[in-house]
Image: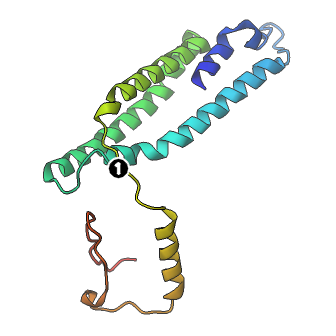
Amino acid sequence: GLCLLTLSEFVPSLKPPTCSTSAHICNRSKRPHENAFFLALYLISLGTGGHKPSLESFGADQFDDDDDGERKKKTSFFNWWYCGLCSGAMLGVTLIVYIQDNVGWGAGFVALTAVKAVAIVILIIGVPFYRYRVPKGSPLIPMLQVLTAAIVKRDLTCPSDPSQLYELVAPGRRRLHHTQRM
């Protein structure tokens, strides 16, 4: 998507017509430019929607919850994750906008595409070192079980003594302690 967006700025047949600065009149954009531009935006949206929700959980999977040292590193990971996310957003609305206003749209698109290319290279280099957790069963089954149990037991009252609650502790998972909320 970013490559196509960059090309839409540099390839003459994909570039929109220039506007007359004296008359403030712009000719209608060519159909190939519109198609390339909107396809690029849709691809960027699909890519962002596909990877953003899974990156945090994939990063969290790199740490073992049973190890105290790794649990602390996991907290640090989320601090750095949020710092990087905010820094990227800040650079996107300051530096990239400055480049696009003062140098040109193409230079801004090239900068974004180059940063994304470097990020992909780093991701590929790190692939052999990642920890992968193999999914066990369908994720829909536990969700449907919870939904069914909630519907069936909607009229039950919660006992005041937490020891009367039943909880099955699955191997490899931490027990959730009872709270007075929710």
Residue 8 lies in what quarter of the image? top right
> Helix, strand or loop at disc 1?
loop
Location of the C terminus by quadrant is bottom left
Left or right of 76, for residue 180:
right
Q: Which residue is mark 1?
A: 133
Q: Which of 73/175 is in front?
A: 175
Q: Residue at x 72, y 29 (%)?
A: 38
How packed is label 1: few (under 14 Cα within 10 Å), some, or many (20 or more)? few
At label 1, the amino acid type is: Arg
Q: Which of 147/80 is in front?
A: 147
- Number of numbered tags placed on the structure image: 1
Left or right of 14, for residue 162:
left
Q: How is the image coloured?
A: rainbow
Q: Residue at x 28, y 65 (%)?
A: 173
Residue 134 percent coordinates (x, y): 38, 51
16 lies above or below 44: above
Q: Which of 168/31 is in front?
A: 168
Residue 80 percent coordinates (x, y): 29, 38
Location of the N terminus by quadrant is top right
Residue 47 percent coordinates (x, y): 56, 36
Residue 32 lies in what quarter of the image? top right
Left or right of 143, for residue 164:
left
135 lies above or below 58: below
